[in-house]
Image (cartoon, grey):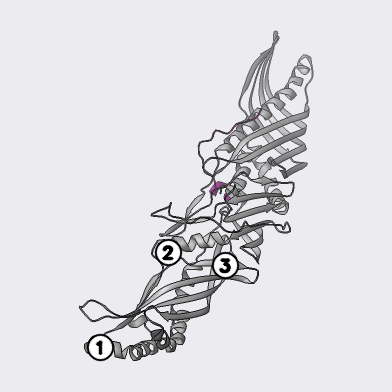
Amino acid sequence: MFLPRLTILFLAFATMMSAEPPGCKIRITSKGLDMLKYETQKFVEEELENITVPDLKGKEGGLQYTIQDVKIQELNLTYADLRFQPDVGLLFDIQNSSISLTFQRHILYWFLHDVGAINASADGVNIHVALYMTRDDSGRLKISNMSCDAAVAKMRAKFSGTLGKVYEFLASFLTTGMRFILNQQVGHSVCVTCKFRQTVDKYVGIDYALLSDPVVTSSSLDMDFRGMFYVLENPNDTIVNYAAYPVVREYDRMVYLALSEYFFDSGMYAYYKAGVFSMQIANERMPKDLEMLLRTTYFGTIMMLNPALMEAPISLELEVSTAPRCVIKTSGATVAVTAVVTVMMLPAGQTPVQLSSMTMEAKLNAKVSMKGKKLAVHMDLRRFKIYSNQSALESLALIPLQGPLKTMLQISIVPIINNRTKKGVQIPLPEGMDFIEEVVEYHNGFIIIGANLHFTKGLREVIESNRQYMPSNSTLAP
C-alpha cells in the first residue's frame, strides 16, 4: 500500500518529452527527492505496519500448517532510501531492518497437534523495489514494469521441543509472504494517474500531456509536457509550436519549471479565439477628459454626418485583430498587441454611428511570478502608438489622442488584464505541495523558475487527495 501511494507523488508531478518541443518542462532534482525521503520514512513505517497478510495454509511432507492473523507490531527501519535509477525510474530500498509480529498457528506434524499464538521477530529485512516509468499512448505517465525483491535474513521466536525445527519453516514463509504481498501492493500503483488536461476558466483549458518518456539520470528526473492552452469549445484549434526548446542546466534547487514562448503564445491564442480580447469603453467607463478630447477631435466629422449626434454618448471599441505574441529574452518578457480602435456615437434608440477606425499597437512588459502552485503574469504598458486606417493625414490628426489613450490603457484596460492574469494557471504539481523561495530567470526563448518544495498538508493527505485510477496494461515483474 505504501508503494502505490508514494508513486502517486511522482505520477502527479509527471502525468503531463519527442520531436515536438515542450511548452513546459519540469526537473525534479535529488534535493527534491531527499525532501520526500525524509517526509516519507515515518509514513512508510505506518503503512508497512498496516499491511494485511492473508492466511496461509499448506502441506509439506508430514507437516500440515495454518498460519493466520499475522500482524506486524513494530517496524524498525534502520535504512530506507528513495533515489533515481538512470534510464529506469525510481528505486526504493529498505535494508537491514527488523519486524516484530504476532500470528496464530495451527500445526499438525504427523500425530502431533499444536495450536496457539506466537510472538516472533524478523531481522535483516531487505526490500528492493524498482519502478520503470514510461509514457502511455494518451500522454499519461505509467509504470510500465516493476520489480520487487524482499528477503528476511533471520527469523527468531522462542520455540522448543519436537516442533522446534518445524518453526524454522516460518522464516521462509515470511520471506515468501512478504514478497508476494509487496508485489500485490505495488501492482495497484499501475492504476494511479492524474489529469493531464485541466480547465483554467470558462474559456480555456491547458494540456499537460507528456511528449515522451521521462529522462532519468542519477541526479534528476526530467519531464517534457506539451504545455498548450486550448479553447474549451474547440480543443483542436491550436497553433504549431516553433518555439525554442527550454534547456535546464541547474540542479541546486528541488524543482525547476521551464516555460517556452509557446506556452504563453498558445494561451493568448486560445483567449483570442474565445473572443475575450474585445472591450467597449463608454458612459461611466469613459474618462471625461478623453470624452471631451474625442468630441473636439471629431467635431467636424460629427457636424458633417448629423449635428444632432453632438449630444449622444461617445464610445471606444477595442478589438484585438490578431493573437498577441510573447517574446522572451534575457532582459525580460514582452507581449505585442495589435488592436482596432473604433470611435462610435451611440444615439439613443438608433444604430451606432462610426466616426473613425484606427490601429493601435502596444508592447507590454510581462513579469512572471509563482505563488504556491499558481503561475501569474503582471503587465505594464511599455510602448503605444495609434495610426489611421484611412489616411496619413488623419494619422497626423490623431497625434493629440496618443497621450490620453495611453493613459486610458494604463488606468482602465491594463488593470483589467492584470486582474485576470493574477488569478494564475496551475502547474502540474500535486495538491498540498507548493513552490517556495522561487527565483525566475529569463533566457532567450524561455523562462526558468527554480524553487524548493513545501508540504501544506500532511504527506498522507497529499497522496490521498491526488489518488485517481485508470485501466492500465502495465506489467509486474516477479
Magenta span dominant secondary structure: loop
Q: Which residues are magenta?
A: 460-478
- Within 10 angstroms of label 1, few (less than 14), some, or many (20 or more) residues? few
Quadrant of the rendering where the C terminus is positioned: top right
Task: Give the residue at x 72% y 43%.
Answer: 86
For the residues marked 3 and 1, what is the alpha-carbon distance in whole angstroms? 44 Å
Q: Residue furthest top?
A: 111
Q: Is residue 357 magenta?
A: no
Examine the rendering and report whether any part of residue 300 can be seen: yes
Q: Residue at x 48, y 64 (%)?
A: 268
Closer to the chain start, of discs 3 and 1, is 1
Magenta highlight on residue 472: yes
Where 464 falls versus 113 (above or below)? Answer: below
Residue depicted at x 21% and y 78%: 350
Amino acid type at circle 2 is Tyr
Amino acid on which the number 1 mark rests in the picture: Met
Q: Is residue 475 above or below residue 287?
A: above
Q: Pointer 3: residues within 10 angstroms few (<14), some, or many (20+)? A: some
Where is residue 470 drawn, in percent x and y? 50, 39
Q: Gap between marks 1 and 2, in whole Å?
A: 36 Å
Q: Tell me the residue that label 2 is attached to.
A: 272
Q: Which residue is mark 3?
A: 327
State the image quarter where residue 79 is shown: top right
- Disc number lying in front (2 or 3): 3
Distance between mark 2 and mark 3 Cα atoms: 17 Å
Residue that numbered label 1 is attached to? 304
